[in-house]
Image (cartoon, rainbow, N blue to C red):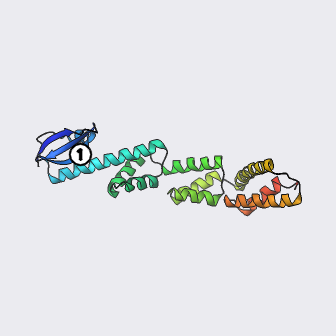
């Protein structure tokens, strides 16, 4: 097969249309054209065409992945899911992920630490809830355990997170209701206990927070 024409694409200036034996064969980016040194009159075997088009798919998938990462950090799972959703082949996606990991642009360990710190800084959760959030992001289990150990080095840290969260909740409640009656106190204890339980904190931690913040009641 002979390259009979290399024609710029009208709406995409960085892409070229390749014609073989007088018929359109495939479109490629200028990067691919230069990489393979394609010129008018070159002879291409079917194997060479397959190699060129495979690299074009890889380049396109890598560009898509970089655009996604430019918006915000992502996990390997998120990148794989996004690329597969737009019909890139599994082999191509694997190559893209491997290259991004090799260059440090994809790092599940670093992502997991940053993600966990952000959650705990904005609205803390207990260990079970944090683990589940990390699992949903596709973080490997061994990485999750390492992050949990960093975030919760001991029970005192869990207590500190829960207490800060409960104190904010109580402050909001006190702004909208009067306090002092026994019924109000019992109701408030239950509300705070349920709130912390939903956030994934264990009963021992919840009890300590209630005793610390509501002991006067």
List the single residue furthest toward the top: 13
Nearer-the-camera pick, 43 or 99: 43
Q: Residue at x 59, y 58 (%)?
A: 131
Q: Residue at x 23, y 45 (%)?
A: 27
Q: Residues within 10 Å of mark 1 (few under 14, many from 20)?
A: some
Nearer-the-camera pick, 101 or 6: 6
Q: Is residue 131 left or right of residue 211?
A: left
Q: Is residue 119 left or right of residue 100?
A: right
Quarter occupied by the C terminus: bottom right
For residue 103, say whether it is visible.
no
Q: Position of residue 163 (x, y in %)?
A: 75, 52
Q: Is residue 174 left or right of residue 22?
A: right
Q: Residue at x 32, y 56 (%)?
A: 89
Picture mark count: 1
Which element type, helix, strand or loop, lies under badge 1? strand
Q: Position of residue 114 (x, y in %)?
A: 56, 47
For residue 207, say whether it is visible.
yes
Q: Is residue 25 left or right of residue 130?
A: left
Q: Position of residue 126 (x, y in %)?
A: 66, 57
Q: Position of residue 97 (x, y in %)?
A: 39, 51
Residue at the disc numbered 1: 27
Q: Quadrant of residue 196?
A: bottom right
């Amino acid at each position: 097969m002979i390259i009979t024409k290399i024609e710029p694409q009208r709406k995409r200036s960085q892409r070229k249309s390749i014609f073989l034996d007088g018929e359109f064969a495939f479109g490629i980016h200028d990067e691919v054209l230069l990489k393979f040194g394609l010129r008018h009159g070159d002879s291409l075997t079917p194997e060479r065409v397959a190699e060129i088009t495979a690299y074009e798919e890889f380049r396109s998938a890598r560009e898509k992945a970089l655009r996604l990462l430019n918006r915000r950090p992502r996990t390997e799972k998120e990148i794989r899911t996004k690329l597969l959703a737009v019909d890139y082949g599994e082999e191509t996606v694997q190559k893209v992920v491997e290259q991004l990991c090799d260059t440090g642009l994809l790092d599940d360990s670093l992502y997991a630490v940053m993600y966990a710190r952000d959650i705990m800084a904005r609205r803390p959760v207990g260990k079970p809830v944090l683990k589940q959030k990390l699992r949903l992001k596709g973080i490997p289990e061994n990485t999750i355990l390492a992050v949990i150990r960093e975030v919760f080095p001991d029970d005192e840290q869990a207590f500190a997170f829960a207490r800060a969260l409960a104190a904010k909740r109580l402050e909001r409640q006190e702004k909208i209701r009067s306090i002092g009656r026994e019924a109000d106190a019992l109701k408030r204890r239950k509300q705070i206990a349920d709130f912390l339980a939903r956030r994934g904190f264990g009963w021992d931690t919840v009890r300590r927070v209630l005793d610390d913040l509501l002991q006067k009641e």
